[in-house]
Amino acid sequence: MSPSIRVAVISIGGFLFLVALSGYAYYQQNRVLAEVRSQLASRSAEALALHASLASTTQDRNALQDALYTEQNKNKVFEDQIREIGNTVGVLDKLAKTDPQLLAKYSKVYFLNENYIPSALADIDSNYLFEPNRTFQIHAKVQGYLYDLLDAAHDDGIDLLVASAYRSFGTQAALKANYRFTYGAGTANSFSADQGYSEHQLGTTLDFTTKNVGGSFVGFEKTDTYEWLNDNAYKYGFVLSYPKANTYYAYEPWHWRFVGKDLAEKLHNEGRTFYDLDQREINEYLVSLFD
């Protein structure tokens, strides 16, 4: 008995051909197609599984990334806190090493006892002195600022010299006694501090003069030197302690005190004087005194 014949239509190169297939061939074709469909179904299932796994992995990755960002933010907060603590410790350490007396208002306000001496004193170069044969000292940390001021003045053609600087408790006592003897107590008290109340004992204060004015200071306020100091001394941290109409002593245009660049600039820009400020406000500048 001859096998059954099937006819199949096959397209090759755009042409249709009728192909006679035996039952067995037809069976084989269907079996292959079934296997292909099965494999496709299996691969589709695998693809879906992979897709689900990928989605799960992506979700896990996003969760891990969010957790990482959270930890990074926490670390940044910790770093900022540690930095802030470090800065605070640095400020406190700096304050602990800075003499608080250096910005105190000593003229008839606070008292320095006979034992107070600046932590370190340095001789002022004789080239800067009105009397080069004498020895004058300044607080060691102020010396560099003073030299910068004097050099800047000389570069501008200004005659600026140091007539007096650090004075000990005993030196101030002797000076005041001499003034009382010469001018009388009332007059002496108007321009000279008692021992313990003099800014000179801090080692941060100087009396300036010129070759022509000399140690009497008469006419100093009319000189180009005084005008230059008013315009420039603040840049180096120095301020005029006793301007006109102050309530402490007579006007002393030659008497300048180092208070640090930040505070000196504030006073200059605002047109204020050192003794105008409350002591608590002044103390805020102690940490930057020698910056």
Image (cartoon, rainbow, N blue to C red):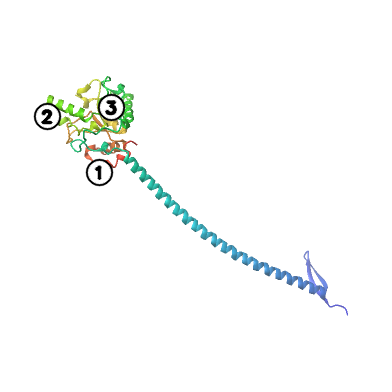
C-alpha distance separating marks 1 and 2: 33 Å
Q: Is residue 49 visible?
A: yes
Q: Earlier in the sequence, mark 1 or mark 2?
A: 2
The crowding category of the residue bearing disc 2, from other C-alpha atoms within 10 Å (few below 14, some 14 to 19, many at least 20), is some
Helix, strand or loop under label 2? helix
57 on left or right of 22: left
Helix, strand or loop under label 3? strand
Q: Which mark is residue 47?
A: none
> Which residue is denoted by mark 1 in the rendering?
280
Amino acid, disc 3: Gln
Q: Position of residue 156 (x, y in %)?
A: 32, 25
> Which residue is denoted by mark 2 in the rendering?
185
C-alpha distance separating marks 1 and 3: 29 Å
The residue nearer to you, when weighing 48 against 20, is 48
Image quarter (top left, top right, bottom left or bottom right) of the C terminus: top left
Amino acid, disc 2: Ala
Disc 1 and disc 3 in contact, CB within 8 angstroms: no
Residue at (25% x, 43% y) in the render: 280
> Which residue is denoted by mark 3 in the rendering?
137
Amino acid, disc 1: Arg
Would you identify the image quadrant in which residue 133 lies? top left
The crowding category of the residue bearing disc 1, from other C-alpha atoms within 10 Å (few below 14, some 14 to 19, many at least 20), is few
